């Protein structure tokens, strides 16, 4: 799967997730509603961070400090948002789905760690072989993330339905 398709799929999954929450928001107790609201807000943040990451990735210029800084800032934002999602405590109804989202996030964080190593080698004196290897590794982890994420979204839809 090429880089563009991988990141387009991430956007599609995020939108699917938000659509499921539109259906979910119709009932439940206060604790469940709070979880739904919190996770929806974090998902909006992840979508924005992912867009910024995609822009930074498309603008990679080895040896250019601005390119490296943009990439590292985008990775920081993604990691912060993914960690925020993991920190949400789910009510009983959503425990199993939260665990699935956490497993997906762990894979995404492995991907961002590889992307960080890639970005650290974009500057002057960086190793372009490492850039290539870490880009590939990050993409592989993100593909694994997408599979886990899709399973969690499907299970959330079942719980909501």
Image: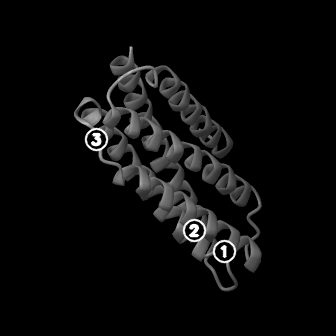
Q: Which of these two is toward me, 129 or 53?
A: 53
Q: Which of these two is toward me, 83 or 133?
A: 83
Choose mark 3 or mark 2, whichever is in front.
3
Q: Is residue 1 left or right of residue 97?
A: right
What number is the disc on residue 81?
A: none
Choose mark 3 or mark 1, whichever is in front.
3
The residue furthest top is 161
Check if mark 3's residue and mark 2's residue have beta carbons within 8 Å: no
Q: Specify few, some or many for label 3: CA neighbours under 10 Å numbering under 14, 14-19, or 20 or more.
A: some
In the displayed structure, 95 sits above or below 117; it is above
> What's the residue at 66%, 74% (across, down)?
122
* Whole-percent x, y for residue 5 in the image: 65, 37
In the displayed structure, 28 sits above or below 45; it is above
Mark positioned earlier in the residue sequence (3 or 1): 3
> What's the residue at 55%, 36% (across, down)?
14
Distance (Cα) linking label 3 and label 2:
29 Å
Q: Specify few, some or many for label 1: CA neighbours under 10 Å numbering under 14, 14-19, or 20 or more.
A: many
Disc 2 target residue: 118
Mark positioned earlier in the residue sequence (3 or 2): 3
Disc 1 target residue: 122
> What's the residue at 62%, 69% (across, down)?
73
Disc 3 target residue: 99
């Amino acid at each position: 799967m090429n880089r563009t398709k991988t990141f387009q799929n991430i956007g599609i999954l995020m939108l699917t997730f938000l659509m499921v929450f539109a259906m979910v928001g119709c009932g439940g107790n206060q604790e469940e509603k709070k979880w739904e609201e919190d996770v929806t807000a974090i998902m909006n943040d992840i979508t924005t961070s992912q867009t910024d990451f995609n822009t930074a990735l498309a603008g990679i210029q080895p040896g250019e400090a601005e390119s490296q800084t943009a990439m590292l800032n985008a990775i920081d934002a993604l990691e912060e948002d993914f960690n925020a999602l993991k920190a949400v405590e789910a009510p009983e109804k959503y425990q199993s789905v939260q665990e699935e989202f956490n497993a997906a996030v762990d894979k995404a964080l492995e991907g961002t760690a590889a992307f960080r190593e890639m970005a650290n080698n974009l500057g002057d004196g960086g190793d372009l072989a490492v850039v290539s290897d870490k880009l590939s590794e990050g993409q592989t982890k993100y593909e694994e993330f997408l599979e886990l994420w899709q399973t969690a979204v499907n299970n959330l839809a079942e719980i909501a339905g």
